[in-house]
Image: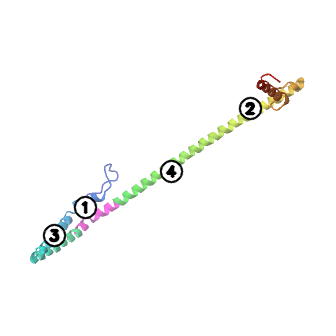
Amino acid sequence: MPSPPPSSFDPDYIPETPTRRLFRRMREEPLIPLGLVLTVSALIGAGRALRANDHQRANIMFRRRVYAQGFTLLCVCAGGLYWSKDRERRQQFDRLERERVAADKRERWLAELQARDDEEKKAKGRVGLLKEKRRQREEVIREKIREEERVERERAVERELNGDIGSREPRKGEDGYENFVQKAAKLVWTGGDK
């Protein structure tokens, strides 16, 4: 009886290699390899007989070769008929196995695409958060600048009201500050001489 093909759910099932397939086929149909061995041995015997110049033995060996080839051909035909349903099931199993492998490959590919998409969304989310934080920091800085400008204007208004217009500190580039720095540098450079 032909054995059923292994289940795809079998954890210890290993896909068939060409060598395994050859040995499996030899176990399933042992008469075909026997016919091949008989044919080859008849050919070798005929070659030896021809070298020994024994024409009668060579003719016998050629007849044996024909019988062996006929036996092999008969075994191939009988085996083909006997194992045809099993071969159909094996082909169906191999086709299903290829489809399963293709579906598994497609699922892994889709999972990888989904993972990349999720990673990209997370990255965009992080970029969005960073942009929002930056915008908030810039807004805080603008508020501080506005507050400092408002305070400076209020101080300037108070100084004007108090009449302390000239009491503010000179800024760089204004006469008082620049002249004082220049004079101090000259004094240090010249050693106190004018």
**Label ID, residue 7:** none
Residue 141 at x, y percent in the picture:
72, 34
Tell me the crowding category of disc 3: few under 14, some 14 to 19, or many 20 or more residues within 10 angstroms, Cα based: some
Circle 2: residue type:
Lys
Pointers 4 and 3 in contact (CB under 8 A)? Answer: no
Q: Position of residue 23 (x, y in %)?
A: 24, 59
CB under 8 Å between discs 1 and 3:
no
Query: Taking 180 as reference, is 104 left or right?
Result: left
The magenta-colored residue range is: 78-92
For the C terminus, the image quarter is top right
Between discs 1 and 4, the one toward the N terminus: 1
Nearer to me, 60 or 106:
60
N-terminal of the pair, mark 1 or mark 2, is 1
Residue at image location 77% in from the left, 30% down from the top:
148
Element type at mark 1: helix
Mark 2, secondary structure of its residue: helix
Q: CA distance from mark 3 to mark 2?
A: 105 Å
Is label 1 or label 2 in front?
2
**Number of residues whose C-alpha sits closer than 10 Å to that of mark 4, classed few (under 14), some (14–19) or many (20 or more):** few
Determine the residue positioned at 40% across, 58% down.
Answer: 99
Indicate the secondary structure of the residue bearing disc 3: helix
- Quadrant location, the N terminus: bottom left
**Tag 2 or tag 3, which sits nearer the N-term?**
3
Query: Residue at label 3?
Result: 44
Q: Nearer the viewer, residue 25 or 78?
A: 25
Closest to the camera, between mark 4 and mark 3, is 3
Which residue bears the numbered disc 1?
A: 25
Which amino acid lies under the numbered mark 1 shown in the image of this protein? Arg
Q: CA distance from mark 1 to mark 4?
A: 42 Å
Residue 95: % across, % down: 37, 60
Which residue is identified by label 4? 113
Q: Is residue 181 left or right of residue 81?
A: right
